[in-house]
Amino acid sequence: MHAPVASLGEAAAGRRILSSFITEQVRVLLEERSTRLGVVGALLVMASLFSLIPTPMGVDPGWMFIVPVAIASIAAGLREGLVTALAASTLVAFYTGASTGELEPGIMLGVVLARFALYGLTAGFLGAFAEAHYSVQSGLRQLASTDPLTKVSNVARFYEVIAGLESCSRNFALVLVDLDDLKTLNDRYGHQTGSLAIQTVANSLRRVVRGSDCVARFGGDEFVVVLKDADRAGAQIVTNRLREVLQEQGLPAAPDVQLSVSIGVAIAGEDGETSEDLLAAADEAMYLDKRARKNCASHSAHGSVA
C-alpha cells in the first residue's frame, strides 16, 4: 500500500519540478526584450496568416490576436500590452478591409477602435495584474536578499553575485571588512551601540562603492564587498576611502570611540578562482592587516610611555 502512494507522491513532485523548470525558462526568455519582441512579432504574423484562411461562417479569425496581446501584457506590462493591442487592431482592420474590399479610412478607423476596445481591455487587465504581481515579487526578492539590520545584501545575495561573475568570467575584487573591537564596544556601551557601529560601517561602505558593486553583511561584524571590473589598485582606492569616511563618523552613545576596520583584499584570477579560495585569501589578508595595525598601535603606546 505504501509503495504506490510513494510512487504517486514522487510523480507529483517530478511534475511540479518540471513545471517549475519550464516556467522559469519561459520567464527568463520573455524577460529579454529582444526575445520577447521576436515572439510577439511572430505571433502577430501567425495571427495575420490565420486571418487569410477562409473560416466557417460566424467564426472570427481576429480571436488569434488575443494571444500576442496577452503574452506582451503579462511579460512586459501595461504599456507594451497596449502597443501590441494597437498593432493587432490595425492588422485586423487591414485584413478585414482587404477581404471585403472596403479600405476607406473611416471604415478602417471604426474597425480599429472596435478591436482596440477588446484587445486594449485585455491588455489593461492583464498588464495591470502583471505589474502588480511583479512589484510584489520584486519586493519579496528584495526582502529575501537584504540583511535586516544594515539594509545591505545578505550572504545569499553575495553568493548569487559571485556566481554570476564567475559564469561570465568577469574580473572583480573581493574585499573583506571586519569591525575592530566590537566585543569591547558591546561590553562597555551595550549591544545597541554595537549594532549602531555595525550599521555605521555598512552605511560607510555604501558611500564608497559604485551602484553596480555589492556590499553584503557576511556575519556579525564582518562585511564582504564585490567590486566589479576592479583590480588591486582600484580596491585600494576604495579601502582608503572607507577608512577616511570612518574617521569622520562618530557614535552618539560612545563619543570617545573611533571606529576602525581591518580589511583584506583578494583579486579574482590572482588570489583564487572560486569564491571559497577568494574568501580564504581575503580572510588571511584581513588578519594580517589587523595584526599589523595592532603591533603599530602597541609600538606607538610604548613610545609615548618612554
Image (cartoon, helix red, strand yellow):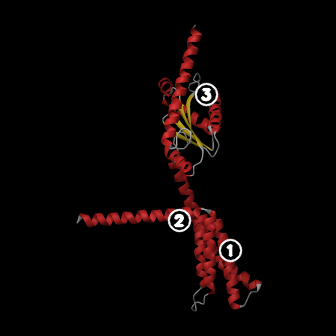
Q: What residue type is labelled 3?
A: Gly
Distance (Cα) linking label 1 and label 3: 59 Å
Task: Write down the residue under mark 3.
Answer: 250
Task: Write down the residue under mark 1.
Answer: 86
- Closer to the camera, 105 or 176? 176
Q: Are marks 1 and 2 in contact (CB under 8 Å)?
A: no
The correct choice, above or below, for 20 with respect to 242 in the image is: below
Q: Nearer the viewer, mark 1 or mark 2?
A: 2
Around disc 2, counting alpha carbons within 10 Å, would you say few (fewer than 14), some (14 to 19), or many (20 or more)?
A: few
Q: What residue type is labelled 2?
A: Val
Quadrant the C terminus occupies: top right
- Closer to the camera, 200 or 270? 270
Residue 205, quarter of picture: top right
Q: Tell me residue 35's x, y (percent).
A: 61, 66
Query: Which structural element holds mark 2?
Result: helix
Distance (Cα) linking label 2 and label 3: 50 Å
Q: Which residue lies furthest to the right in this view?
A: 105
Q: Which amino acid does label 1 sit on?
A: Leu
Quadrant the N terminus occupies: bottom left
Q: Tell me residue 130's x, y (percent).
A: 57, 64
Tag shown at residue 26: 2
At a point 31% along the width and 66% down the height, the residue shown is 8
Query: Which structural element holds mark 1?
Result: helix
Say which label, 2 or 3, has the lower sequence index.
2
Q: Tell me residue 182's x, y (percent).
A: 50, 28
Around disc 3, counting alpha carbons within 10 Å, would you say few (fewer than 14), some (14 to 19), or many (20 or more)?
A: some
- Closer to the camera, 261 or 198? 261
Residue 46, quarter of picture: bottom right
Q: Tell me residue 128's x, y (percent).
A: 60, 65
Q: Do the residues labelled 2 and 3 touch (CB within 8 Å)?
A: no
Distance (Cα) linking label 1 and label 2: 25 Å
